[in-house]
Image (cartoon, rainbow, N blue to C red):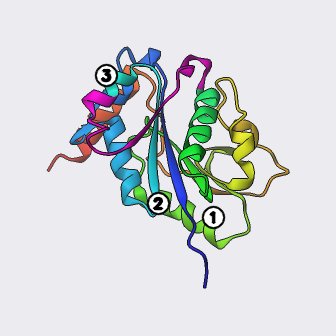
Amino acid sequence: MKKELHIAVLVMAAGASRRMNGIKQLMPWKDSNFLLETIKTVEKSNAASVHVVLGSNAKLISKECNLIEKKINVIVNPNWSNGLGNSIAYGVKALLKKLPSVDAILICLADQPLLDHNYLNSLINVFENNSCKIAATNYDKKIGVPALFSNIYFQHLSQLEGDFGAKELLNNDELSIISLETLDGIIDIDTKLEYNELINRTNAENKP
């Protein structure tokens, strides 16, 4: 009988979103905001657990999103200003202290509001049904997140630094990586202009 893997999701939401001119995690989206809608998406997937890494404005974000009341495992990185890589490393180490038997970690960003749970399930299915150790997203020949890493890479993830996230791993041709073609919806929203364009496009698509 095939062993069911415990796949944990780390939602990265620690940055200061300086280019947004606001708190990106709390930007209004659908019925709530970017972070909560990302959590909802992850919870609809076949992953076993969801964990949120906060940093800048952590107390405010946690309070506004009622994360404690929702029983979301919140990891607060005190060194979030050292970049995404540092926050991934901190999150992985904190997650493994809580759940040392995790088989794989799926890293997602809180600023990809059009991300769909079906796509996350596609990554999970590819990972589970192939010999690959990493399943990631292909952005026009560049590999990025969402990305799913087997436990053999946990130590490497826990040693990341700087603001390049897991790019060193994801773009290493020597590693066993399967990448899925990116969907139109998997876009980062980094600026107020991009946010306004997203809202305008969504409103236009939803007009009767």
Determine which residue is flagged by label 3: 60
Mark 2 / mark 3, whichever is N-terminal: 2
Residue drawn at x 45%, y 54% is 49
Q: Nearer the viewer, residue 191 or 76?
A: 76
Q: Nearer the viewer, residue 3 or 188?
A: 3
Residue drawn at x 56%, y 60% is 123
Quadrant showing the N terminus = bottom right
Image coordinates for residue 108, horizontal then vertical, percent: 51, 44
Q: Amino acid at mark 2?
A: Ala
Image coordinates for residue 37, horizontal then vertical, percent: 32, 43
Residue 67 belongs to magenta span = yes
What label does residue 48 carry, if any? 2
Residue 105 belongs to magenta span = no
Q: Nearer the viewer, residue 183 or 35?
A: 35
Instruction: Choose mark 1 or mark 3, whichever is in front.
Output: 3
Determine which residue is flagged by label 1: 127
Circle 2 SS class: loop
Q: Is residue 15 visible?
A: yes
For residue 33, above or below residue 155: above
